[in-house]
Image (cartoon, grey):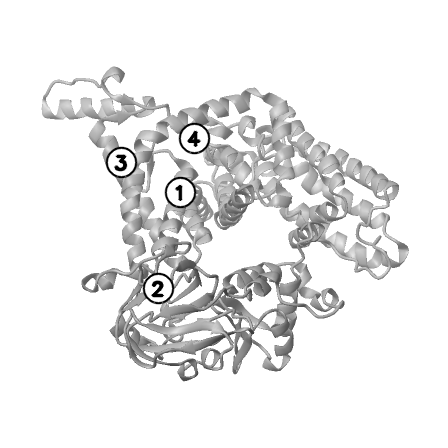
Amino acid sequence: MRDKIFGVLQKIGRSFMLPIAILPIAGLFLGIGGSFTNATMLASYGLTSVMGEGTMAYNFLSILNASGSVVFSNLSLLFAVAVAIGMSDREKATGAIAAVLGFLIMNAVISQLIAITGTYDPSTLAVANDARQLEAVQNGTTYTPLLEENVRMLPSGAITTLLGFTTLATGVFGGIIMGLIAAHCNNKFHDQQLPAVLSFFAGTRFVPIITALESILAGFILFWLWPYVQIGMNALGNLVISSGYIGTFVYGYIERALIPFGLHHVFYLPFWQTQVGGEMMIQGKMIYGAQNIFFAQLADPSCTEFNVEATRFMAGKFPFMIFGLPGAALAMYQTAYPEKKEVAGGLLLSAAITAMLTGITEPIEFTFIFVAPGLYYGVHCVLAGLSFMLMHIFNVGVGMTFSGGLIDLTLFGIMQGNDKTHWIWVVVVGVVYFFIYWILFKWIIVKWDLQTPGREREGQETKLYTKADYKAKKAGEAGEVDMRSAAITKGLGGKHNIDGDVDCCITRLRLNVIDPEKVDEALLKQTGAVGVVSKGKGLQVIYGPTVPNIKNALELFLETPESEKVDELLAGGNIQANEEVKEAAAAAVGTEYFQTPIEGRCAGIEETPDDAFSQKMLGDGIVIFPTGNKVYAPCDGSIEVLFPTNHAIGMKSAEGTELLIHIGVDTVNLEGKGFTPKIKQGDTVKQGDLLLELDLPFLEANAPSTAVPMIFTALPDSKKVVILKKGDVKPDEDIVEVTDK
């Protein structure tokens, strides 16, 4: 369960990257536009005559300012779309449009409920009374003010205006919630079948419909629940603020410590975008979240000094990113072996410049995470936490969009003036940090003989490491190197011979290769494949019902650096089939009888219009050319696999015999259309239970064939399949016997 939760959090964190990656350009627009349209700043630099209000330059910069501001004002919508895309397993575009629709409906519902129930917060109550008084004067009626005791009151700043709606200030959390709802609806209903009269709304068209309905419910729930969440976040924010410098240190340490796990976005986002990171009234509007406060102050011409209680969650990155890590890079260069210094120096110089300019620190950080985790957590993370604390102590008010490099420091620190930001302390502390990192890292590398770039053992490559390298190393330490996927990769001609994504149906991997001549069919069969079908550059590798697990493992393996060196991994000899394949060949017990799964004409499996089935690559069996539209369980047993497109069912009989019922040829391409399942994966069924209903006319019109093979996929050599009846068959007839040879 812990691993599953961790995996979901990582997936959510990755989905955050899409809107976060937008922030640098939006921040650039806002930083330049906001700075050079500020009258005080223009006067300070003597630029009023050329860039003051009314000039062409001023007008252009105002447009930049508005372009950046609109992004930060609507981050919640961007997060809704990004989370829906990131969490959708397929049909991501459908998930995105459903998220937009759902977000609008949810806020419309909240807006109407605010109006219907007479809900106010202290900041909007006065505005409402002013409006009532004006209306009374215009109409010549008596003015009756609204009183707090007579209306539903919410915490201060709980109500805001978003996309024209008067709604609750749910911030990015509202977007994240709606993104998760849209992704859930998309994953569950993208292949939904409906009665024929409503068939136009089936499949992906059904996703926005169900999302809209769930959005209405979400609006009702949030209207009543979110004020209590706000109270809790306000309390948490007050606790964080009261923690002072120690709290800032802890924040900085944890933010860096989560980098290897990819969870740092999940951690810092509440501080940047919600009450947890503080609140501030700016230009008559309550602003929540450290980053939002900073950019609201940036756009406020009356602001004379940025609020350090907000920038304490950002400014700490600048000293160690611009100065500290380049010092560590210098230490690694100086400790490199003479014969490797030139190569190591080029790599380290590039990484150091990248960290300084952009704040992208992965090449350096993951290098010493890889070679010495203790150096990362025991030294770097501690120094990072201290950097955040020192910027807080020295009242540094420099914000950021994405990361703490020179670009952000220039835009949001230097250009704003030292009186406003106290940016000079970044340089003072940064210079000290450069020498601390340089001296400390140099001593530790030599003292413990760490294999930093240029100090590798003989024969090892001089390189900087990435997140993928780190993940692969951890997997190797846990004994998780996937040798089977390595063998499949080599059998496919290597990672770079795979053209595009790897897909699968219920029995086979489906992919394209660049050069079919590089495919090693013999090696693929050693991994458990029972056959390989090649159609030009299109390849099908047949494994049977376990193929979804094989596909998932292969995709994960292809993301690791190990996939680049499969020859080295497999140098020890042949790779045998995975244990799950071997176990699938366990002997069935006794003689079993199987009934007709669907009404139609029964024939030997050789008549199936698909080579993989007709050549018995998956096993022996029968094929039925259907006239009926209902698929029944041919025996007592369990549903082991129900493919997401519902075109194939893997069963295990009560005696342990595995069988596959596959409806049609290439029906996986129909994406679930034409199939209505009556069971789900994991169900226990009795012989004759209804499994599927088919839209047979639709399948006949859209599939190469509607033939239904029933294959016994893992029979031992001691067993044989005997066909009891050919020709016209009905579902209650015994047509196959599995018995001893």
Tell which of 464 and 204 is nearer to you.
Answer: 204
Labels 1 & 3 near each other (Cβ < 8 A): no
Q: What element carries label 2?
A: loop
Amino acid type of the residue that numbered disc 4 sits on in the rendered structure: Ile
Gap in angstroms between the C-alphas marked 4 and 3: 19 Å
The answer to which image quadrant residue 676 occupies is bottom left
Q: In this view, does 419 lie to the left or right of 457?
A: left
Gap in angstroms between the C-alphas marked 1 and 3: 16 Å
- Numbered disc in front, either 2 or 3: 2
Gap in angstroms between the C-alphas marked 1 and 2: 44 Å
Q: Name the residue under label 1.
A: 175
- Residue occupying image coordinates x 58% and y 77%: 514
Q: In this view, does 141 lie above or below 580?
A: above
Dot 2, how many residues are within 10 Å of its Cα: few (below 14), some (14-19), or many (20+)? many
Q: Is mark 1 on a helix, strand or loop?
A: helix
Tell which of 688 and 400 is nearer to you.
Answer: 688
* Residue 405 % position (x, y): 63, 44
* Residue 318 % position (x, y): 65, 38
Q: How many marks?
A: 4
The answer to which image quadrant residue 614 occupies is bottom left
Q: Name the residue under label 3.
A: 111
Label located before the other in sequence (1 or 3): 3
Label located before the other in sequence (2 or 4): 4
Q: Name the residue under label 2.
A: 633
Q: What element carries label 4?
A: strand
Amino acid type of the residue that numbered disc 3 sits on in the rendered structure: Ser
Q: Can I make out residue 579 in this image? A: yes
